[in-house]
Image (tube, grey):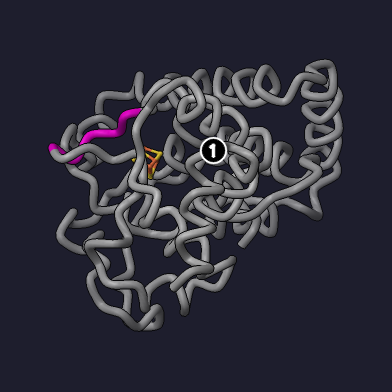
Amino acid sequence: MPIPAVVARTFEMFKEDASFRKLLKQMARKMAKFTEPQKRARFIYKKVDEELAKQFQDPMVSQLVQCKKGCSACCHTQVSVTIEEAELLATKVKDGLPIDWTKLFVQASAGVSSAQFFRIPYEMRGCIFLDDEGQCRVYEDRPVVCRTNHVLSDPKQCEVKDSNSENQPKVQLLNTYAADTWAYTFFQNSPVTGTLPQLVKSVLSEFPMTKKVSDQDRDV
Ligand code: SF4
Protein backbone atom coordinates (compact mmCIF):
# COMPACT_ATOMS: atom_id res chain seq x y z
CA MET A 1 0.00 0.00 0.00
CA PRO A 2 -0.68 2.38 -1.54
CA ILE A 3 0.79 1.10 -4.84
CA PRO A 4 -0.67 -2.39 -5.24
CA ALA A 5 1.98 -5.06 -4.60
CA VAL A 6 1.66 -6.76 -7.99
CA VAL A 7 1.92 -3.43 -9.81
CA ALA A 8 4.95 -2.42 -7.73
CA ARG A 9 6.59 -5.76 -8.53
CA THR A 10 6.23 -5.10 -12.26
CA PHE A 11 7.86 -1.69 -11.78
CA GLU A 12 10.75 -3.21 -9.77
CA MET A 13 11.31 -5.78 -12.48
CA PHE A 14 11.68 -3.27 -15.32
CA LYS A 15 12.71 -0.02 -13.66
CA GLU A 16 16.34 -0.18 -14.82
CA ASP A 17 15.26 -0.48 -18.44
CA ALA A 18 15.49 2.88 -20.25
CA SER A 19 12.72 2.03 -22.72
CA PHE A 20 10.42 1.10 -19.83
CA ARG A 21 11.07 4.44 -18.12
CA LYS A 22 10.43 6.22 -21.43
CA LEU A 23 7.16 4.31 -21.76
CA LEU A 24 6.11 5.42 -18.27
CA LYS A 25 6.70 9.05 -19.22
CA GLN A 26 4.67 8.66 -22.42
CA MET A 27 1.82 7.05 -20.50
CA ALA A 28 1.90 9.81 -17.87
CA ARG A 29 1.67 12.46 -20.60
CA LYS A 30 -1.34 10.73 -22.15
CA MET A 31 -3.02 10.44 -18.77
CA ALA A 32 -2.33 14.10 -17.91
CA LYS A 33 -4.57 15.18 -20.79
CA PHE A 34 -7.50 14.06 -18.65
CA THR A 35 -7.73 16.69 -15.94
CA GLU A 36 -11.17 15.68 -14.70
CA PRO A 37 -10.57 12.88 -12.12
CA GLN A 38 -13.37 10.54 -13.15
CA LYS A 39 -12.48 10.84 -16.85
CA ARG A 40 -8.85 10.11 -15.98
CA ALA A 41 -9.88 6.95 -14.13
CA ARG A 42 -12.02 5.80 -17.04
CA PHE A 43 -9.17 6.49 -19.49
CA ILE A 44 -6.87 4.23 -17.46
CA TYR A 45 -9.57 1.53 -17.25
CA LYS A 46 -9.91 1.62 -21.03
CA LYS A 47 -6.15 1.20 -21.48
CA VAL A 48 -5.93 -1.58 -18.86
CA ASP A 49 -8.89 -3.43 -20.39
CA GLU A 50 -7.36 -3.14 -23.87
CA GLU A 51 -4.09 -4.65 -22.67
CA LEU A 52 -5.88 -7.46 -20.86
CA ALA A 53 -8.08 -8.17 -23.90
CA LYS A 54 -4.90 -8.66 -25.97
CA GLN A 55 -3.65 -11.22 -23.43
CA PHE A 56 -6.96 -13.04 -23.31
CA GLN A 57 -6.91 -13.52 -27.09
CA ASP A 58 -4.55 -16.38 -26.31
CA PRO A 59 -6.86 -19.37 -25.64
CA MET A 60 -4.33 -20.80 -23.20
CA VAL A 61 -4.65 -17.72 -20.99
CA SER A 62 -8.45 -18.02 -20.87
CA GLN A 63 -8.09 -21.70 -20.07
CA LEU A 64 -5.57 -21.21 -17.25
CA VAL A 65 -7.26 -18.30 -15.48
CA GLN A 66 -9.49 -19.63 -12.70
CA CYS A 67 -11.56 -16.49 -11.96
CA LYS A 68 -15.26 -17.10 -12.55
CA LYS A 69 -18.39 -14.95 -12.32
CA GLY A 70 -19.76 -15.05 -8.77
CA CYS A 71 -16.39 -15.83 -7.13
CA SER A 72 -15.69 -12.96 -4.78
CA ALA A 73 -12.85 -14.34 -2.64
CA CYS A 74 -10.51 -11.48 -3.59
CA CYS A 75 -13.22 -8.94 -2.70
CA HIS A 76 -12.49 -9.64 1.00
CA THR A 77 -8.99 -8.21 0.81
CA GLN A 78 -7.66 -4.69 1.05
CA VAL A 79 -8.02 -2.87 -2.27
CA SER A 80 -5.70 0.02 -3.17
CA VAL A 81 -7.24 2.89 -5.10
CA THR A 82 -6.33 6.35 -6.30
CA ILE A 83 -8.43 9.35 -5.30
CA GLU A 84 -9.78 9.52 -8.87
CA GLU A 85 -11.15 5.99 -8.48
CA ALA A 86 -12.60 6.81 -5.07
CA GLU A 87 -14.39 9.81 -6.56
CA LEU A 88 -15.88 7.66 -9.30
CA LEU A 89 -17.10 5.09 -6.75
CA ALA A 90 -18.41 7.74 -4.37
CA THR A 91 -20.48 9.21 -7.20
CA LYS A 92 -22.36 5.89 -7.41
CA VAL A 93 -23.26 6.21 -3.74
CA LYS A 94 -24.26 9.87 -4.12
CA ASP A 95 -26.44 8.81 -7.06
CA GLY A 96 -28.31 6.35 -4.84
CA LEU A 97 -26.38 3.05 -4.75
CA PRO A 98 -27.01 1.72 -1.22
CA ILE A 99 -23.99 0.60 0.81
CA ASP A 100 -23.42 -0.79 4.28
CA TRP A 101 -22.17 2.36 6.02
CA THR A 102 -21.10 0.53 9.18
CA LYS A 103 -18.91 -1.76 7.07
CA LEU A 104 -17.42 1.26 5.32
CA PHE A 105 -16.52 2.87 8.64
CA VAL A 106 -15.12 -0.33 10.17
CA GLN A 107 -12.99 -1.06 7.10
CA ALA A 108 -11.80 2.54 6.78
CA SER A 109 -10.66 2.47 10.41
CA ALA A 110 -7.90 0.02 9.40
CA GLY A 111 -6.25 2.77 7.34
CA VAL A 112 -3.56 1.34 5.06
CA SER A 113 -2.50 -1.33 7.55
CA SER A 114 -3.18 -4.80 6.17
CA ALA A 115 -2.52 -6.29 9.64
CA GLN A 116 -5.39 -4.23 11.06
CA PHE A 117 -7.61 -4.88 8.08
CA PHE A 118 -7.34 -8.66 8.43
CA ARG A 119 -8.22 -8.42 12.13
CA ILE A 120 -11.69 -7.23 11.07
CA PRO A 121 -14.14 -10.21 11.16
CA TYR A 122 -14.40 -11.87 7.74
CA GLU A 123 -18.09 -10.96 7.26
CA MET A 124 -17.24 -7.29 7.78
CA ARG A 125 -14.32 -7.41 5.36
CA GLY A 126 -16.34 -7.91 2.16
CA CYS A 127 -16.16 -4.94 -0.19
CA ILE A 128 -19.02 -2.47 0.26
CA PHE A 129 -19.79 -2.87 -3.45
CA LEU A 130 -20.29 -6.64 -3.32
CA ASP A 131 -23.86 -7.97 -3.56
CA ASP A 132 -25.36 -11.00 -1.79
CA GLU A 133 -24.67 -13.21 -4.84
CA GLY A 134 -20.96 -12.36 -4.76
CA GLN A 135 -21.16 -10.00 -7.75
CA CYS A 136 -19.62 -6.56 -8.08
CA ARG A 137 -22.25 -3.79 -8.20
CA VAL A 138 -19.83 -1.30 -9.77
CA TYR A 139 -18.33 -3.70 -12.31
CA GLU A 140 -18.00 -1.17 -15.17
CA ASP A 141 -16.15 1.24 -12.87
CA ARG A 142 -14.37 -1.25 -10.60
CA PRO A 143 -10.87 -0.17 -9.55
CA VAL A 144 -7.82 -0.96 -11.61
CA VAL A 145 -6.55 -3.70 -9.25
CA CYS A 146 -9.90 -5.48 -9.49
CA ARG A 147 -9.29 -5.59 -13.24
CA THR A 148 -5.69 -6.79 -13.29
CA ASN A 149 -5.88 -9.65 -10.76
CA HIS A 150 -6.39 -12.99 -12.52
CA VAL A 151 -5.60 -16.08 -10.53
CA LEU A 152 -3.93 -19.18 -11.95
CA SER A 153 -3.80 -21.20 -8.71
CA ASP A 154 -6.68 -23.04 -7.04
CA PRO A 155 -9.39 -20.43 -6.25
CA LYS A 156 -9.71 -21.98 -2.76
CA GLN A 157 -6.35 -20.34 -2.02
CA CYS A 158 -7.91 -16.92 -2.61
CA GLU A 159 -9.99 -17.37 0.58
CA VAL A 160 -8.61 -14.95 3.17
CA LYS A 161 -10.44 -15.99 6.33
CA ASP A 162 -7.46 -15.96 8.70
CA SER A 163 -7.28 -12.84 10.86
CA ASN A 164 -3.49 -12.78 10.67
CA SER A 165 -2.31 -11.00 7.53
CA GLU A 166 0.89 -13.09 7.63
CA ASN A 167 -1.10 -16.31 7.26
CA GLN A 168 -2.90 -15.44 4.07
CA PRO A 169 -2.44 -18.13 1.41
CA LYS A 170 -0.16 -17.33 -1.50
CA VAL A 171 -1.89 -17.18 -4.87
CA GLN A 172 -0.35 -17.41 -8.31
CA LEU A 173 -1.46 -14.53 -10.53
CA LEU A 174 -1.31 -14.12 -14.27
CA ASN A 175 1.50 -11.73 -15.25
CA THR A 176 -0.19 -8.64 -16.65
CA TYR A 177 2.85 -6.43 -17.25
CA ALA A 178 1.35 -4.08 -19.84
CA ALA A 179 -1.83 -3.47 -17.80
CA ASP A 180 0.28 -3.13 -14.63
CA THR A 181 2.37 -0.43 -16.30
CA TRP A 182 -0.75 1.66 -16.89
CA ALA A 183 -1.80 1.00 -13.30
CA TYR A 184 1.63 2.04 -12.04
CA THR A 185 1.44 5.28 -14.06
CA PHE A 186 -1.96 5.97 -12.51
CA PHE A 187 -0.86 5.41 -8.90
CA GLN A 188 2.44 7.20 -9.35
CA ASN A 189 0.79 10.34 -10.74
CA SER A 190 -2.30 10.47 -8.56
CA PRO A 191 -2.33 13.22 -5.90
CA VAL A 192 -3.71 10.85 -3.23
CA THR A 193 -3.73 7.06 -2.95
CA GLY A 194 -5.00 4.78 -0.20
CA THR A 195 -7.48 1.99 0.38
CA LEU A 196 -10.94 1.79 -1.15
CA PRO A 197 -12.89 2.23 2.13
CA GLN A 198 -10.52 4.93 3.40
CA LEU A 199 -10.73 7.13 0.31
CA VAL A 200 -14.41 6.50 -0.49
CA LYS A 201 -15.25 7.49 3.10
CA SER A 202 -13.08 10.57 2.75
CA VAL A 203 -14.76 11.65 -0.51
CA LEU A 204 -18.17 11.05 1.08
CA SER A 205 -17.31 12.89 4.28
CA GLU A 206 -19.79 15.68 3.55
CA PHE A 207 -22.47 13.32 2.33
CA PRO A 208 -25.46 13.29 4.77
CA MET A 209 -25.38 9.55 5.62
CA THR A 210 -21.66 9.69 6.40
CA LYS A 211 -22.26 12.55 8.80
CA LYS A 212 -25.10 10.63 10.45
CA VAL A 213 -22.96 7.51 11.00
CA SER A 214 -20.10 9.68 12.32
CA ASP A 215 -22.45 11.31 14.81
CA GLN A 216 -23.70 7.91 15.95
CA ASP A 217 -20.11 6.74 16.44
CA ARG A 218 -19.37 9.80 18.53
CA ASP A 219 -22.42 9.17 20.71
CA VAL A 220 -21.38 5.58 21.53
S1 SF4 B 1 -15.03 -3.01 -6.40
FE1 SF4 B 1 -16.09 -4.82 -7.12
S2 SF4 B 1 -14.48 -6.22 -7.88
FE2 SF4 B 1 -13.50 -4.63 -6.59
S3 SF4 B 1 -13.35 -5.52 -4.52
FE3 SF4 B 1 -15.27 -4.34 -4.64
S4 SF4 B 1 -16.86 -5.84 -5.25
FE4 SF4 B 1 -14.85 -6.75 -5.70
Q: Which residues are magenta?
A: 133-137
Q: Nearer the viewer, residue 20 or 48?
A: 48
Report x, y in % for residue 193. Answer: 69, 50
Q: Disc 1 on helix, strand or loop?
A: helix
Q: Is mark 1 within 8 Å of ligand 1?
A: no
Residue highlighted by disc 1 = 208
Report x, y in % for residue 3. Answer: 64, 55
Q: How many marks?
A: 1
Left or right: 82, with 216 as reference point:
right
In the image, is residue 174 part of the stretch drawn in magenta?
no
Report x, y in % for residue 63. Answer: 20, 33
| Amino acid at dot 1 | Pro
Q: Residue at x 45, y 61 (%)?
A: 216
On screen, residue 5 above or below 119: above
Quadrant where the C terminus sits is bottom left
Left or right: 167, with 148 as reference point:
left
Q: Residue at x 26, y 31 (%)?
A: 60
Q: Residue at x 47, y 66 (%)?
A: 217
Q: Residue at x 37, y 56 (%)?
A: 102
Left or right: 45, with 175 as reference point:
right
Q: Residues within 10 Å of mark 1 (few under 14, many from 20)?
A: few
Report x, y in % for residue 165. Answer: 39, 78
**Main SS of residues in magenta:** loop
